[in-house]
Image (cartoon, rainbow, N blue to C red):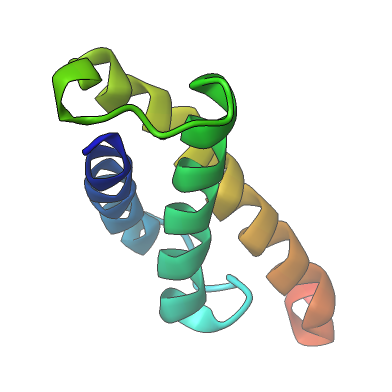
Amino acid sequence: MSLLVWVMMAIAIWHFAVFVPDHFAGGIVGAFLAAIAGAALFGFLVSGLSVPGASDTRLVQAFVAIPGSVIGLAISYMYGSRRNPEVRAH
């Protein structure tokens, strides 16, 4: 159940990607996948390499996903900016 919470929180954070220029690797879809992967991986690591079940899911699981999705978006943005040479010219 926590995995669902992590993914839903990542989707909520991903919506803020419209406020920055689209330099994500893979465009907006790449940003979507990076946010979900970052939140799921970070949540998995913070939870002790396991996914808490329905009875162990608390509000804190939603907050665990925020840094993971932001880190995933930042990595995608940096990679996409470096990969595209015309972005660096501006």
Tell me the residue at 73%/77% (across/down). Answer: 87
- Compared with 1, 38 (above or below) is below
Count the labels in the image.
Answer: 0
For this view, does 44 lie left or right of residue 28? right
Residue in the foreground of this view, choosing between 14 and 86: 14
Quadrant for the C terminus, please.
bottom right
- Residue 89 position in % (x across, y down): 82, 76
Picture coordinates of residue 29, whole percent (x, y)? 42, 79
Is 14 located above or below residue 83 in the figure? above
Specify whether 79 is left or right of 15.
right
Q: Quadrant of residue 15?
A: bottom left
The residue that appears at 15% across and 20% down in the rendered structure is: 55
Q: Position of residue 25 (x, y in %)?
A: 63, 75
What residue is rendered at 42% in x and 76% in y? 28
Give left or right: position of 82 versus 41: right
**Which of the 4 image quadrants contains residue 32?**
bottom left
Residue 51: x, y in percent?
40, 34
Residue placed at 23% from the left, 17% from the top?
56
Q: Is residue 49 above or below residue 81?
A: above
Residue 37 or residue 71, whichever sits in front: 37
Placement of the N terminus among the 4 image quadrants: top left
